[in-house]
Image (cartoon, grey):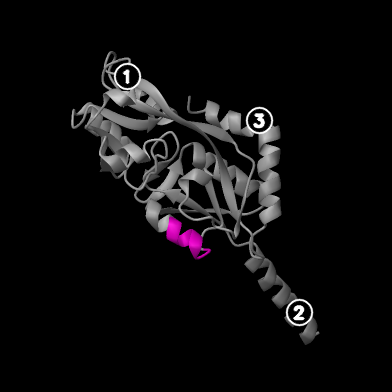
């Protein structure tokens, strides 16, 4: 009887260990509608809803680790993140071979934004300062920043980049389309920031750590099921 009791206890402990939360990376530089961060905690937004739903589908609790973007890169290398969503291979500095890519779930469009609507070409912008997010990579513009044709002015979050543009700290900034639309919803009539031209259009997906303590294949299958059931579109529609 004592051996049976011990076996049950060990089984219970093993089950508890298997059901630990899934650790999701949340970059503190994201803004609504992608994520809402309050007192250092993720509390809402597109990625919050997506990650909560994904954890629910595999029977886990979602633990959302809000960290600076560069710190997240280091945690990925050390295997301290289980799932990172909203990422494209071109945005990563390392291959992260211990992670598997999921199906893509949406497209991010990066736009050059100004205060007034204009017809611009990048070639006309010699020496202009562009509002950018600290730690973000912009592959299409990287050679122009490196050569000095354009200059970066980094802010900690995407929302701060747009705030500085509105405050005339510079004349142009880069923003993803969804964040720009959300930002403009908060502005008085006639004071919207204006998209000038599309800089890039990238599919985004999740990467999932491929280790025994992570239900890797279940997570990847859940993402496929969510796409087939149009769950991604349902989540996006809440914030449009």
Residue at 73% over, 73% down: 11
- Magenta stretch prevailing secondary structure: helix
Q: In whole angstroms, how far apart are the C-alphas of marks 3 and 1?
A: 36 Å
| Structural crowding at the residue carrying mark 1, measured as other residues with C-alpha within 10 Å and reported as few (<14), some (14–19) or many (≥20) | few
Magenta stretch holds residue 152? no
Q: Nearer the viewer, mark 1 or mark 2?
A: 1
Residue at 46% over, 40% down: 44
**Mark 3 vs 1: CB contact within 8 A:** no
Q: Is residue 67 above or below residue 29?
A: below
Q: Considering only order in the chain, which callout, 2 or 3, is on the residue closer to the N terminus?
A: 2
Residue 74's x, y, as percent?
43, 61
Q: Secondary structure at mark 2?
A: helix
| Structural crowding at the residue carrying mark 2, measured as other residues with C-alpha within 10 Å and reported as few (<14), some (14–19) or many (≥20) | few
Q: In whole angstroms, how far apart are the C-alphas of marks 3 and 2?
A: 44 Å
Q: Considering only order in the chain, which callout, 2 or 1, is on the residue closer to the N terminus?
A: 2
Q: Secondary structure at mark 1?
A: loop
Snapshot quadrant of residue 73: bottom left
Look at mark 1 in the image and give the residue it sits on: 120
Residue at 21% over, 32% down: 127
Residue at 59% over, 36% down: 105
Q: Nearer the viewer, mark 3 or mark 2?
A: 3
* Residue 107: numbered disc: none
**Highlighted range, magenta:** 73-79
* Residue 7: numbered disc: 2
Nearer to me, 168 or 198: 198
Residue 218's x, y, as percent?
70, 51
Look at mark 3 in the image and give the residue it sits on: 230
Snapshot quadrant of residue 97: bottom right
């Amino acid at each position: 009887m004592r051996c049976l009791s011990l076996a049950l206890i060990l089984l219970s402990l093993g089950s508890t260990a298997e059901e630990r939360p899934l650790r999701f990376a949340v970059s503190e530089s994201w803004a609504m509608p992608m994520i809402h961060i309050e007192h250092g905690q993720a509390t809402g937004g597109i990625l919050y809803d997506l990650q909560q739903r994904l954890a629910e589908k595999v029977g886990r609790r979602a633990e959302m680790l809000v960290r600076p973007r560069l710190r997240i890169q280091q945690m990925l290398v050390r295997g301290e993140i289980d799932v990172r969503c909203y990422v494209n291979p071109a945005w990563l500095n390392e291959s992260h071979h211990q992670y598997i890519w999921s199906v893509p779930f949406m497209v991010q469009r990066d736009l050059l934004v100004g205060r007034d609507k204009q017809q611009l070409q990048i070639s006309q912008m010699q020496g202009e300062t562009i509002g950018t997010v600290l730690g973000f990579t912009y592959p299409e513009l990287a050679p122009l920043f490196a050569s000095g044709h354009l200059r970066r002015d980094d802010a900690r979050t995407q929302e701060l980049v747009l705030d500085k543009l509105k405050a005339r700290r510079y004349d142009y900034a880069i923003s993803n389309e969804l964040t720009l639309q959300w930002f403009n919803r908060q502005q008085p009539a006639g004071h919207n920031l204006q998209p000038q031209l599309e800089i890039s259009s990238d599919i985004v997906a999740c990467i999932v750590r491929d280790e025994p303590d992570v239900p890797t294949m279940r997570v990847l299958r859940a993402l496929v099921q969510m796409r087939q059931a149009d769950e991604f579109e349902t989540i996006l529609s809440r914030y449009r």
